[in-house]
Amino acid sequence: MARITVEGSTLVVEMEGLDKLWALKSRLDIPLANVRGATADPGIVKEPKGFRAPGSHFPGLLVAGSFHTKGEWVFWDVKDGARAVVVELADERYARLVVEVDDPRATVDLIERSLAAR
């Protein structure tokens, strides 16, 4: 699972517990200027993941790390798809972040409010 916060003008995504190991990352810092939006999307876990490079993928259990699909990089950290949030990015290494959070609606609201306040 990940924890998403906004610190000043930066979106901070911190992986928690063993997710740091599975995703091979502990934190991502993204300027809010490069965040296009966020949505709660429990169905996204059924989409093809692409090529893992590096990361972990145990179908039906866990997808974490960097994946290349359709010409773009996507960062995943999801075990429970019902709690998945998709963050769309521009001008970043990753085109999207797909992460599991405690409260998807609250996380999407936080991101959208932060973008509106910019």
Image: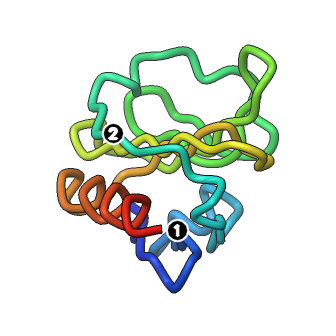
Residue 8 lies, with reference to residue 96, above or below; the image says below
Q: Position of residue 111 (x, y in %)?
A: 37, 60
Q: What amino acid type should be assigned to the residue bearing mark 1?
A: Val
Residue 118 lies, with reference to residue 60, above or below; the image says below
User: Mark 2 touching mark 1, by CB under 8 A?
Assistant: no
Disc 2 secondary structure class = strand
What residue do we see at 34% from left, 55% from top? 112
Left or right: 69 as drawn, with respect to 44 = right
What residue do we see at 62% from left, 44% from top? 89
Residue denoted by label 2 = 39
Left or right: 26 as drawn, with respect to 47 = right
How many residues crowd around disc 2 within 10 Å: few (fewer than 14), some, or many (20 or more)? some
Q: What amino acid type should be assigned to the residue bearing mark 2?
A: Thr
Q: Which mark is residue 108?
A: none
Which of the two discs, 2 and 1, labels the residue nearer the N terminus?
1
Q: Position of residue 86 (x, y in %)?
A: 43, 40
Q: Position of residue 47 (x, y in %)?
A: 47, 16
Residue denoted by label 1 = 13
How many residues crowd around disc 1 within 10 Å: few (fewer than 14), some, or many (20 or more)? some
Nearest the viewer among 60 and 42 is 42
